[in-house]
Image (cartoon, rainbow, N blue to C red):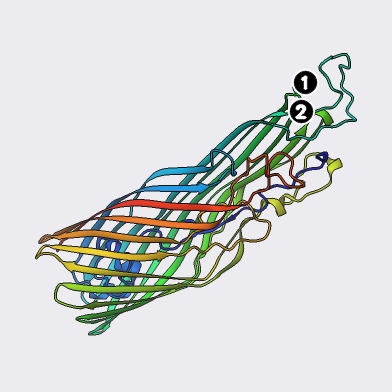
Amino acid sequence: MQRYIHVVLLLFITANLSAQENHYWTNQFGSRSALMSGAVVGGVRDTSAGFYNPGALGFVKKSSFSVSANGYQMEFVSVENGAGTEEPKEIESQEFNIVPLLISGTVSLGSNTFGYSLIGKNQSSIKLSGRRAELIDMVASDPNYIYPYQDDEDFSGVAFDGVEDYRGQFSYNSKVSEILGGLSWATNIYPNFSFGITGLLALRSQRYSSSSVVRATNEGYGSGFIASEDQFSDADFYNLRTFLKFGIAADFDELKLGVTLTTPSISLYGKGTVGAGSVKFKEDEAIGTLEDDRQNDLDATYKTPMSLALGLEYMLTGQTIIATTIEWFAEQSDYNVMTPISRNFRVGESLGYKDSKEVLTVKDSAASIVNFAIAIEQALSSTMTGYLSFRTDFETFQGHEGELKPMAINNWDIYHTTIGIIRQKKDSKSAIGLVYSTAHQSDFKQLANLDSSTRQAGDFILASKNQTTADYNALSLIIGYTYFFK
């Protein structure tokens, strides 16, 4: 194996992030709206209309206050061969999240309706780790090395001769949360039509860290030679942005229609930190190589694109309603989330110059997608209504050549199925439901490859990462309560 006295190129060059993280329809909000998987752009007639279709608020003539108290979510992520093809093959993450879904209300004044809402839009976390230990001849010997203790009878005259005791481990952690606050206004423009607008503020917080540490110590003659390779990257930011949602709703008794237009967001303020580093060291060459930098208090930007949604709700019978919504999201072109200043990423002037700005810049982009939802509402009694719904949650990730370690790894299409009931009382209603979410990705990029046997030309101790498969499953509990007051 060739000598590694040059500085390593990071596996973590240029972090890349997206909206889960890479999804727009992760959570739904409001008692009925959540149980219908968001298929309510045409027929929403409660306080959640401020988010789904502000135009529909014009048909809400009762002042009310609604709390979808908590959504309890257990997320499971499993990656086959996540750290390599050798045992243990599967790595897993099991995370429990408490997701506050929606607090909202409306005030009706004549032909005008005003609304307010506070929404916990995203709350997701993933933690993965792996370890491997074995005895293997993985570090090439150096026949020209002059051992300082020539009289050692166990010394063969060749450094790193024989097998090495190899230990490797990695960890990956990511978390994203987003809160929306909105004020809405709507009015009836014709007896069967209503127009409305919602102004929204979004506060997003996202962090990520990933590290790999591998060691190999010589066992052939007890000299204790060590070869090591470490890599890490992390990023943490928050951002406040604003955008508008326009909506029109039409109500023809059995048939309800709706259309919304959401504007691209405008970033208002944000700050963040990004860092990365890499070390390679082989003791028989008596040289270490290092790249490292961390930059704090950087301006942070986050953007979401324009979207257009269409919704329909139709009463099949006096007890059965079917509804559907489809939403198109425009492409989000590349932009920098955080841009560090230029300085030498390499430690040691003799190694040359490598720009931290090129290495540490955090980028974002999103593909154009279309999501759809379908729901059935069935009256079970005079006070009880049942729901069954389904929605897609397609990923938006757009990778770039060389960006091997994104902030978000969940680049999979998620499918959500929801079942639940609502109990109606004179001045309130309560809801309970379950959501099962599942996804599979067949081209998942390994987070690290600790296989010593799969190293390729140019690898030192860490092997080059390969394609594998990943599975995502989540079970969520929805609890909602709405109180109507005069």
Disc 1 marks a residue whose amino acid type is Tyr
Which circle's residue, 1 or 2, is located before the other in the chain?
A: 2
Residue tagged by mark 1? Answer: 221
- The numbered mark at residue 94 is none
Mark-to-mark CA distance, 1 and 2: 8 Å
Disc 2 marks a residue whose amino acid type is Gly
247 sits to left or right of 161: left
Query: Seen from this angle, which residue lies furthest bottom?
Result: 190
Query: Looking at the picture, how far across and down is residue 190, in whole percent?
Result: 26, 86
In the rendered view, tell whether residue 50 sits above or below residue 168. Answer: below
Q: Residue at x 57, y 35 (%)?
A: 131
Question: In this orientation, which residue lies closer to the viewer: 162 or 56?
Answer: 162
In the rendered view, tell whether residue 240 sits above or below residue 151. Answer: below
* Circle 1/circle 2 CB separation < 8 Å: yes
Query: Looking at the picture, how far across and down is residue 128, in whole percent?
Result: 51, 42
Q: Residues within 10 Å of mark 2 (few under 14, many from 20)?
A: some
The picture quadrant where one finds residue 211 is top right
Q: Is residue 294 among what the camera can see?
A: no
Q: Label 1, secondary structure: give it.
A: loop
